Image (cartoon, rainbow, N blue to C red):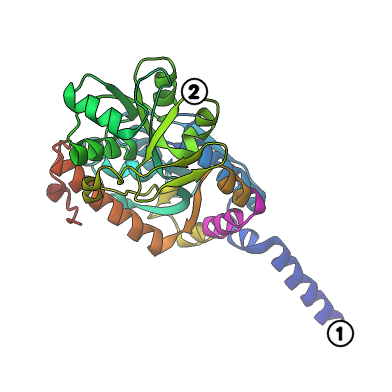
Amino acid sequence: MKKILIFGLIVLMALATGVYAAKGFPKRDITNVCVWSAGGGTDTCNRIISAEMSKFLGKNINVINKTGGVGGSVGMSFAYKRPADGYTLCGLSESCVTAGVQGGWNNRMDVWDFFIVGGSPDVISVTPNTPYKNLKDLIEAAKKSPKSIKAAASAAGSIHHLNLLAVEDGSGAKFNFIPYTGSAPSQNAAMAGEVSVVVTSLAEQQQLLRGGKLRPLAMLIPDSFKVEGLGTIPSSFDDYPGLSKYLPISQAIGFAVRADAPDDVKAVLTDAFKKAIATDKLKTWAKENYYLLSGKTGKEAKAEFNSLESNFAWTLWDLKAAKVDPAKLGIPKP
């Protein structure tokens, strides 16, 4: 009986400590290398999920920023050169899938395994001192005087840049695109008067919109979007149905670990990720900031990034905004 009791206690202790003790990982703090600048959507998202995961892992996940290059290539290269032991994560977004066709990344995105937190739809906005009251005003002005209106988005090839290109192609307008290292700097540029137009996500803009720092013109999705305190932001498709050829393109923000990391290490990260994304804190944050939570991992997440890579790469190539032929990288057409 005594042996049975001892065995039972051992089993209970193992269950209490969970999969982490069984796998022996992590034994030290983990570093999450975010490829976009501090304050942007990817950075914020990674800091929140990393903090929640740390509670389940028993070790900190420290987020650092490594910006630059194209499509987050500097940060991705830095993280990928680290050992495949699970102690280095790469905080990224769907925009990173364009790094290859822009000449900054020599690998396909399938060298990573992904953990997708979610995303927020893009909105095109202007500074309050501009005369544009709706999207049609802006588009007609840009068509009348091509490339005279400065428009900001994060780095060339990001989802926000791609959405701006799609707006141009679907409407016939031509903007003077000014790239920035991330969403926060591009929004700051708009508020400082460096540019008149900015394309970032609703999650990233919402505080500025409520504060009257920016004026929303249209959502870059098929449907209008009701925002508390702002009313309903119309869909860009209402006046320009040609946008449907390239839009919508959904965000996929989260982090990745090298695909050749040990399976048991990835299992530990997956377990912590699933638990973290199910917490009330994550759900409340997502609701308050207009994020749709995903929670995809493994094959499902990789399939989504493969699709994004194909869509983004070939769209950029068709729009003559890519330096490298996707076919040479082995990226299939969508």
Q: How crowded is mark 2: few (under 14 residues within 10 Å), some or many (20 or more)?
A: some
Q: What stretch is highlighted in magenta?
A: 268-281
Residue at the spot of label 1: 1
Question: Residue 52 in magenta?
Answer: no
Looking at the image, do the residues carrying marks 1 and 2 touch, with CB atoms under 8 Å apart? no
Question: Residue 276 in magenta?
Answer: yes
Q: Type of residue at label 1?
A: Met
* Disc nearest the viewer among 1 and 2: 2
Q: Residue at x 29, y 35 (%)?
A: 161
* Label whose residue precedes the other's in the sequence (1 or 2): 1
Closer-to-camera residue (72/117): 117
Q: In this view, does 282 lie above or below 211?
A: below
Quadrant containing the C terminus in the rendered view: bottom left
Closer-to-camera residue (147/294): 147
Residue at the spot of label 2: 213
Give coordinates of residue 265: x percent, y percent: 51, 57
Quadrant containing the N terminus in the rendered view: bottom right
- Occupied quadrant, residue 146: top left
Tell which residue pokes out farthest to the top in this image.
Answer: 193
Which secondary structure class fits the magenta region best? helix
Give coordinates of residue 118: x percent, y percent: 47, 50
Tell which residue pokes out farthest to the right in this image.
Answer: 2
- Residue 175 seen in the current view: no
